[in-house]
Structures are given as structure tokens and as C-alpha cells.
Image (tube, rainbow, N blue to C red):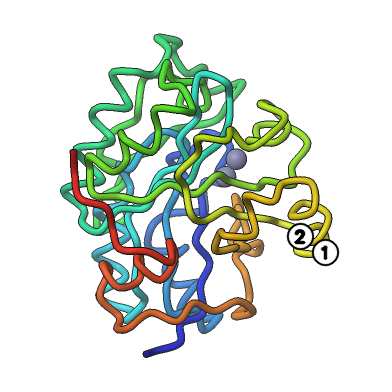
Amino acid sequence: MTSLYYDLHIHSCLSPCGDDDMTPANLVGMAYVKGLDVIAVTDHNSCRNCPAALKHGQEYGVIVIPGMELCTSEEVHVLCYFPTLEDALDFDSYVYEHLLPIKNREKIFGKQQILNENDEETGRVEKLLISATDISFDHVYDLVTKYHGIMCPAHLDKSSTSLLSNLGFVPPDSRFTCVEVHDLGMLHALKKANPYLNACSILSSSDAHYLADIHEPNHQIFPKSRALDDILHAIAKQQIPNPL
Ligand SMILES: [Zn+2]
Ligand SMILES: [Zn+2]
């Protein structure tokens, strides 16, 4: 078993709300400086800065999980983590097709920059990434599993765009096994009100949109090895499910 300091919810400059300084090179570099072992790049409804981030991760010795913060049709944010870049990019293509056809307006929402491994812009995403998709929450588990990934409802304690704020409860037929809670001081009350959470692995990450907000090495996971499969297993506290 190994212990890894993590921050598994970080936005890059691809998210319109992400600071332009959140380039893949800068955010991985900041994770390295802070002493984090593993991070996840989780832009809104897109994985397109993951290729560059993974490349920088290899250079810095920081493990980068390719991820996404999916917005469901109910506007519930769900973090999705994948064992390979290929799985993440396949999922990205599926999600983009299911994103509402609203164009980004840069002056209002910000730029949606795709950067290559040299931190050079190679394009901008046209549809507004902070829109909802037409994917309902109850389809996310099977969908993400199909791409070999795991789902983790984001910022459960947030008063908007969370599972509890938008659905009001944990659906009884849920199958997810990990959740993100921003303020761990809320955990006891959350578990009391939602006993489902007692069986879940609890993560707490930064949801950083600015370099300075990336977490200090405060929280750890304990995977069998540094391999992405083992890390996802440790996050989800279960075997990665077989695809459908
Ligand atoms: Zn969110
Ligand atoms: Zn976020």
C-alpha cells in the first residue's frame, strides 16, 4: 500500500470560469510545488486539456487522473475519473454530443482554451461548457462504467449544483461509492440525514479555478500502487466495475 496526497477536483483554463493562468503546465507545476502526489483535471463537461496535463504530470512526477466534472440534466455536478486518457477522450466525445447547443460568449463567460503539451493554444471549444447536458443523474453510473470510469457526486454540501441541493436526497437506487464533500465539518450531519453516505468513500478536494486555490497536501488516499487502476479502486473503495 502507498499513501498519496491528492487534490482531485481542479479546473484548467478550458473551463470558462477557470483562470487563464490555469494552463496544464502551470497547474501541474503548482501541484508539484505544493507536494501533491496525485491530481485530477476536471473541467466542466470536457477532458480536452487532459492530454497536456498528463504529459506534464509525467515530467513532474505528479500522477494526473484524466477527469471531468459532468453537469447532468438536473444540473447536478458529478466528478468522473478514468483509468486511461483514451477512455476519458471517448467519454468527452459522447458528452459533447449531449451538451446543450448553446455557444460560449467569451466576453460574458470566459475563454475555453485547449492547450497542447507546450502550453500553446490549439483551439477553443465552441459550445458553452458550463451548460447542462441531457444526461440524467440516474444514467451516470452506467454511462461512466461503460467508459471504465468511476463517478463521484461533487461538492455534496454546496447549496447549488450538488446532488443534495438539486435532487434533495440520495436516490435509493444509487450505486456510486464515493462522494466529494468540501467542508468536512458538515460530514456528520450529511451522513445522519443521508445514511447511504456511511458506505461511501469521502473525498475533499479544492475545486480550484485559480492556481492559489489548489490544495496543500492535507488529504490522502491509500492505493495498492501508483497505477491509475489502483488509484481509482482506492477512490471508489471497490473493484472498477466491468463495462456493460
Ligand atoms: Zn461543480
Ligand atoms: Zn468544479
Residue at mark 2: 187
Check disc 2 and report its element: helix, strand or loop: helix
Quadrant location of residue 233?
Answer: bottom left
Above or below 198: residue 4 = below
Above or below 163: residue 53 = below
The total of numbered circles placed on residues is: 2
Check disc 1 and report its element: helix, strand or loop: helix
Name the residue at 56% across, 59% down. 200
Name the residue at 33% across, 47% down. 49
Name the residue at 47% across, 46% down. 79
Q: What amino acid type should be assigned to the residue bearing mark 2? A: Leu
In the drawing, does residue 206 fall left or right of residue 23? Answer: right
Question: Which residue lies most toward the top here?
Answer: 101
Across and down, in percent, residue 5 comes to 51, 80
Across and down, in percent, residue 181 comes to 67, 55
Foreground of the two, 19 or 152 = 152
Name the residue at 51% across, 84% down. 35
In the drawing, does residue 139 fall left or right of residue 48? Answer: right
Which quadrant does ligand 2 occupy? top right
Q: Are marks 1 and 2 in contact (CB under 8 Å)?
A: yes
Residue at mark 1: 185
The quarter of the rendered structure image containing the C terminus is top left
Foreground of the two, 229 or 34 = 229
Across and down, in percent, residue 15 comes to 49, 38
